[in-house]
Image: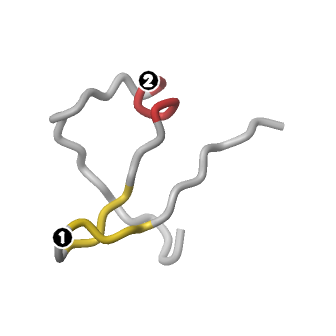
Amino acid sequence: MRSHPVTAVAKWGNAPAIRIPKSVMQEAELHEGDAIDFEVQEPGV
């Protein structure tokens, strides 16, 4: 079984924010400043 990193929604100024774990950043080849497009596929997930 593969372990997945867990994070939580936090507050950044007046906006909600999600911190992306370093391991996810590396696996997705993301870098600070990259634009990310989100899509909700199932409510609550």
Residue lying at the far front in this picture: please name it: 13
Residue lying at the far right in this picture: please name it: 1
Mark 2 touches mark 1? (CB < 8 Å): no
In this picture, residue 30 sits left or right of residue 35: right
Label 1 crowd (10 A; few <14 / some 14-19 / many >=20): few
Residue 40, percent across and down? 38, 66
Can you say whether 37 is above or below 2 in the image?
A: below
**Disc 2 residue type (three-letter):** Gln
Nearer-N-terminus badge (2/1): 1
**Disc 1 residue type (three-letter):** Gly
Quarter where residue 15 is shown:
bottom left
Residue 2, percent across and down? 76, 36
What residue sits right under mark 2 in the picture?
A: 26
Identify the residue shown where x is 44% and y is 23%: 26
Q: Which mark is residue 36?
A: none
C-alpha gap between disc 2 and disc 1: 26 Å
In this picture, residue 16 sits left or right of residue 21: left
19 or 43: which is nearer to us? 19
Q: Report the quarter where the N terminus lies.
A: top right
Query: Which element carries disc 2, helix, strand or loop?
Result: helix
Can you say whether 4 is above or below 39 in the image?
A: above
Query: Which element carries disc 1, helix, strand or loop?
Result: loop
Dot in front, 2 or 1: 1
Residue 14, percent across and down? 17, 77
Residue 13, percent across and down? 18, 70
**Colouring:** secondary structure
What residue sits right under mark 1 in the picture?
A: 13
Label 2 crowd (10 A; few <14 / some 14-19 / many >=20): few
Can you say whether 22 is above or below 45 in the image?
A: above
Can you say whether 42 is above or below 35 in the image?
A: below
Identify the residue shown where x is 41% and y is 45%: 20
